[in-house]
Image (cartoon, rainbow, N blue to C red):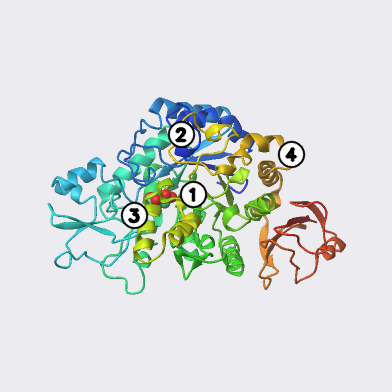
């Protein structure tokens, strides 16, 4: 099945639209906004989890895989969502969090209560001595990946929060249960799935210290991952449906295996290397300016590498775990509109299936919080503490959290300039940046030159142009540190995309813009009027021949 002409819209339900005035978004809120989603021209809606959960990690800590958390609605609401979406030609993709459960899941509770059968569902190990966990692995949110259970005198593995014990995929019964979960939702009319950190499901056979890092390399893309994934796909009957795997610390070789049609695993993968180009020495909590030449190399490696070997990328800048791209790689003040449009075109004209994250299409910015009390995310709160304990002042710690917090992507969708950005009638669970007064759907629907209308144009352009869907891709201006440029080719047709990632005028090094025109290329769109001699701040130029 081909997904090159499709576009996915991602919803974080908690922050999308609150239909019942409790300050929390919900399923009926999505139903009420289906016309808006339809107006974007997208095909699929991927919604992040709304299953029963203590919400320690935004719902990625599931306590019941086959029910709906009452805070988000009911199963009837969900059924109605699938039906109402289908009536508008939209399909639903659900998030499957199968690497770990919540500690409140019945399986874990029964394991803790001493049922050996359920203890085999998790990864329980002896420590290495008094108070010493089995290995030095660190969890994703800071601190050891092991937690001691005095009653069992064993440690359990949690690669994420302590409330998220990892499942034991070596146990066939666990794999069977999880395949049944996927099947359950498939039978309810869901069109596809996003699999959370699915490349972390296969742990090493021998548990030993990571002498170089925090452990990730030992359990990412583990030895049995491809076998488990193809079994899951087969047993749940989802081969050929739209599926995307979230791949943490992965590599090209494995993503090819995950996504090549002959592997019968997934239809595409998310990788994250391009979103680490502003991590100093690979550390998310050390700030540095984005390294555009590194970004270019990563795009080239993944775009060309996946194309040459029949793999398929999901292409994206934003999601509920990432700061807003316009604040991060653009300029959310002086060149807000220009940079948001440039970043959009850069991704949407690539090879792959584009994902738009709620609010990205209107240029929503980072949260711009100024006190730690405004943050909600477990990772941000943990790291604030770690940074302070490590000697950072409050101002320094808040600056780092301000740029890196996942809450930047979780502030309420900005529907209008009304109170609470029209997301809710009461104080929402997390506050909005003050710019909702101008950055909002209502304002941008009225403005033909808005970021919103630019996104709609890009989605339509992909659907109408085979070259965007299926064309080959080659990068040029490879030595230019300010510009990322690529050429798409399909038969005799050519499409050139030139992006300036700097807030100033920059020059091309392999021939200036007028030379493309002299060569028969026509500018078909961009984010500035006409053509200048050089590229203007955050300019994108799209040429066609
Ligand atoms: C990735 C999800 O996107 C993120 O929000 C979550 O915290 C982790 N996986 C753990 O489930």
Contact check, label 1 and label 2, Cβ < 8 Å: no
In front: mark 3 or mark 1?
1
Cα distance in 3D space between marks 1 and 2: 16 Å
Determine which residue is flagged by label 3: 160
| Side of 197 relative to 291 (left or right) | left
Marked residue nearer the N-terminal end (1 or 2): 1
In the drawing, what numbered circle is on residue 427?
A: 2
Cα distance in 3D space between marks 3 and 1: 25 Å
Determine which residue is flagged by label 4: 448
Marked residue nearer the N-terminal end (2 or 4): 2
Q: Residue 504, percent across and down? A: 71, 63
Cα distance in 3D space between marks 2 and 3: 29 Å
Marked residue nearer the N-terminal end (1 or 4): 1
In front: mark 3 or mark 4?
4
CB of mark 3 near ligand 1 (< 8 Å): yes
Nearest the eye: 533 or 387: 387
Q: Residue 410, percent across and down? A: 48, 45
Marked residue nearer the N-terminal end (3 or 4): 3
Q: Residue 404, percent across and down? A: 48, 57
Q: Secondary structure at mark 2?
A: loop
Marked residue nearer the N-terminal end (3 or 1): 3
In front: mark 2 or mark 3?
2
Q: Residue at x 49, y 31 (%)?
A: 424
Nearest the eye: 318 or 20: 20
| Side of 192 relative to 219 (left or right) | right
């Amino acid at each position: 099945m081909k997904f090159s002409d499709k576009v996915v819209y991602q919803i974080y339900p908690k922050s999308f639209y609150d239909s019942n005035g409790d300050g929390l978004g919900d399923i009926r809120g999505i139903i009420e906004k289906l016309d808006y989603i339809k107006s974007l021209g997208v095909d699929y809606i991927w919604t992040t989890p709304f299953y029963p959960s203590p919400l320690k990690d935004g719902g990625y800590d599931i306590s019941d895989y086959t029910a709906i958390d009452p805070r988000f609605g009911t199963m009837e609401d969900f059924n109605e969502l699938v039906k109402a979406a289908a009536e508008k030609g939209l399909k639903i993709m659900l998030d499957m969090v199968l690497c770990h459960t919540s500690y409140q899941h019945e399986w874990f509770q029964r394991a803790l209560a001493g049922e050996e059968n359920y203890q085999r569902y998790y990864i329980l190990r002896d420590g290495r001595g008094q108070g010493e966990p089995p290995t030095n692995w660190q969890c994703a949110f800071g601190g050891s990946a092991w937690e001691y259970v005095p009653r069992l005198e064993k440690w359990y593995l949690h690669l994420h929060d302590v409330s998220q014990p990892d499942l034991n995929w070596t146990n066939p019964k666990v794999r069977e249960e999880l395949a049944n979960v996927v099947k359950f939702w498939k039978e309810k009319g869901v069109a596809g799935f996003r699999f959370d950190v699915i490349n972390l499901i296969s742990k090493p056979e021998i548990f030993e210290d990571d002498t170089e890092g925090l452990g990730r390399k030992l359990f990412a893309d583990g030895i049995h991952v491809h076998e488990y994934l193809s079994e899951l796909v087969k047993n749940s009957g989802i081969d050929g449906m739209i599926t995307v795997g979230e791949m943490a610390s992965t590599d090209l070789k494995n993503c090819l295996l995950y996504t090549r049609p002959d592997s019968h695993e997934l239809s595409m993968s998310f990788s994250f290397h391009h979103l680490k180009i502003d991590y100093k020495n690979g550390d998310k909590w050390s700030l540095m300016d984005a390294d555009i030449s590194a970004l270019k190399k990563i795009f080239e490696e993944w775009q060309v590498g996946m194309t040459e070997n029949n793999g398929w990328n999901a292409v994206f800048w934003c999601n509920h775990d990432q700061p807003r791209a316009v604040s991060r790689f653009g300029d959310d003040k002086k060149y807000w509109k220009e940079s948001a449009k440039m970043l959009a075109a850069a991704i949407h004209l690539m090879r792959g299936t584009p994902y738009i994250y709620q609010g990205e299409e209107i240029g929503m910015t980072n949260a711009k919080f100024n006190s730690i009390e405004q943050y909600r995310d477990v990772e941000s709160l943990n790291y604030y503490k770690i940074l302070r304990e490590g000697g950072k002042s409050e101002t320094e710690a808040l600056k780092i959290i301000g740029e890196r917090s996942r809450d930047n992507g979780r502030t309420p969708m900005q529907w209008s300039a009304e109170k609470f950005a029209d997301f809710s009638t009461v104080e929402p669970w997390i506050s909005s940046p003050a710019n909702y007064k101008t950055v909002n759907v209502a304002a941008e629907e009225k403005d033909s030159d808005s970021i919103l209308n630019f996104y709609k144009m890009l989605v339509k352009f992909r659907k109408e142009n085979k070259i965007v869907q299926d064309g080959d891709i080659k990068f040029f201006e490879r030595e230019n540190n300010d510009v990322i440029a690529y050429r798409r080719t399909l038969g005799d047709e050519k499409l050139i995309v030139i992006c300036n990632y700097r807030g100033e005028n920059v020059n091309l090094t392999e021939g200036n813009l007028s030379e493309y025109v002299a060569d028969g290329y026509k500018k078909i769109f961009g984010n500035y009027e006409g053509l200048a001699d050089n590229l203007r701040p955050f300019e994108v130029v799209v040429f066609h021949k």
